[in-house]
């Protein structure tokens, strides 16, 4: 009996300690909940003010500043709340009755300028399809353009694919297939988007890039599989779409040029020259530009150009080398790129 009586005070002390700890935990949780609620309220208040400025200001510069502020707001929104915020904004784009064209244009522009993430919402497929349908039906050119850009900032679409295009760390077949599907998702499922032709063109370039990355990193790579079979056939399908009027020919000269560079890698110099001649013979002017980030992927940063070249001048300059070096060997690519990196276009005459 005495032993039992002696243990009861210890039991009461333990119970008091447990109760105290529970109260502390509850108090901390309550503070955390209040803090999050206040933070969320302030964030919503800030978002509403930005949207009001986009919608109401008659000053274009002020509206653009508000649009950029909205982009910054989205970039700084924490991961847990991003989807909900994007969903809310997408609903405002869809709401033609209660959202002005100015507001819908501004929101679309801001989403299209996001830098730190690719948007994803709870029902991603439905959100993408709804935005694409609205894009197809829209008559206002500025709003239509911005809706297109906003759509292509979605996870798994154009800009996400370009992010994967620039990835040169260890490339597995799973990574390659995933990025191929991102490009295909754009031009197969959203063919009326202005990004469809770009996605098709960059997919062709992506196959060649993957081959060269694998080659330079010392990984197994089959030149015929990646270039002749995949890249070249993708270029040909791209040209077919342009010919049928399904794509604007905005990347056509770029595609002819990089297809010719593919033929060089395959050692088919005569075919490379024929492809370059298509640029020279086309009805283009000196002002038509081909964008070159780098002629071929390389570990050498000096090969990065990141500039535009007049198409006819670049083709003529390239053909000159090819005609003088018809025999391909293992050292051809390095010497060829060194020659191309020296190209400086002539200034057009007034």
Image (spheres, helix red, strand yellow):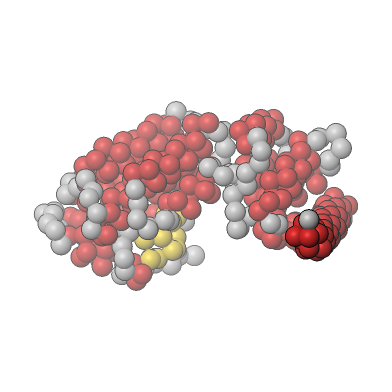
Left-right relation of 169 to 41: left
In the image, what residue occupies the spot 28% across and 50% down?
211
Instruction: State the image coordinates of residue 337 (x, y, percent, origin top left).
Output: 26, 63
- Picture residue at 24% right of the left edge, 54% below the top: 219
Residue 330 shows up from this direction: yes
Determine whether 193 is above or below 307 in the image: above
- Vertical position of residue 147 compared to residue 59: above or below: above
- The percent coordinates of residue 107 (x first, y second) are 74, 48
Q: Residue furthest front?
A: 1
* Left-right relation of 159 to 134: left
Q: Nearer the viewer, residue 139 or 27?
A: 27
- Left/right placement of residue 175 relative to residue 228 reads right
Could you say which quadrant of the image residue 282 lies in?
top left
Quarter-of-image position of residue 240: top left
x and y percent of residue 62 in the render?
A: 81, 61
**Farthest-out residue, top:** 244
From the viewer's perspective, is residue 298 above or below residue 280?
Answer: below
Q: Measured along the vertical axis of the image, is residue 191 above or below residue 330?
A: above
Q: Nearer the viewer, residue 311 or 21?
A: 21
Q: Is residue 292 visible?
A: no
Q: Using the image as rendered, state which of residue 118 and residue 135 is in the foreground.
A: 118
Q: Quadrant of the N terminus?
A: bottom right
**Residue 113 x/y as whole percent:** 64, 54
At 80% from the left and 35% from the top, the residue drawn is: 95
Across the whole image, how many numbered discs are drawn on residues? 0
The residue under the point 44% across, 63% down is 307
Of 297 and 322, nearer the camera is 297
Q: Based on the displayed image, in which of its 4 quarters is residue 132 positioned?
A: top right
């Amino acid at each position: 009996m005495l032993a039992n009586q002696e243990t009861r005070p210890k039991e009461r002390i333990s119970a008091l300690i447990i109760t105290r700890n529970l109260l502390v935990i509850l108090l901390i949780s309550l503070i955390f909940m209040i803090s999050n609620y206040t933070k969320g309220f302030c964030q919503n208040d800030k978002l509403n003010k930005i949207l009001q400025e986009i919608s109401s200001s008659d000053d274009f510069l002020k509206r653009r500043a508000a649009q950029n502020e909205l982009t910054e707001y989205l970039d700084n929104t924490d991961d847990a709340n991003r989807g909900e915020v994007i969903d809310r904004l997408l609903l405002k784009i869809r709401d033609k009755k209660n959202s002005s064209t100015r507001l819908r244009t501004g929101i679309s522009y801001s989403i299209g300028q996001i830098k730190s993430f690719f948007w994803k919402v709870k029902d991603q497929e439905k959100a993408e399809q709804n935005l694409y349908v609205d894009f197809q039906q829209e008559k206002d050119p500025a709003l239509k353009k911005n809706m297109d850009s906003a759509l292509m900032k979605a996870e798994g679409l154009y800009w996400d694919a370009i992010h994967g295009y620039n990835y040169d760390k260890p490339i597995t077949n799973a990574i390659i297939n995933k990025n191929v599907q991102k490009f295909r998702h754009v031009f197969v499922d959203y063919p009326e988007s202005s990004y469809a032709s770009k996605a098709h063109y960059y997919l062709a370039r992506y196959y060649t890039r993957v081959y060269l990355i694998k080659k330079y990193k010392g990984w197994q790579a089959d030149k015929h599989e990646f270039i002749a079979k995949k890249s070249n056939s993708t270029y040909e399908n791209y040209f077919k779409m342009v010919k049928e009027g399904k794509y604007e020919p905005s990347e056509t000269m770029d595609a002819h040029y990089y297809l010719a560079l593919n033929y060089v890698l395959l050692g088919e110099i005569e075919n490379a020259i024929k492809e370059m001649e298509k640029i020279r013979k086309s009805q283009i002017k000196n002002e038509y530009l081909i964008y070159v980030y780098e002629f071929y992927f390389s570990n050498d940063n000096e090969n990065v150009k990141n500039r535009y070249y007049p198409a006819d001048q670049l083709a003529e300059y390239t053909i000159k080398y090819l005609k003088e070096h018809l025999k391909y060997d293992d050292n051809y690519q390095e010497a060829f790129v060194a020659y191309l990196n020296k190209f400086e276009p002539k200034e057009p005459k007034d």
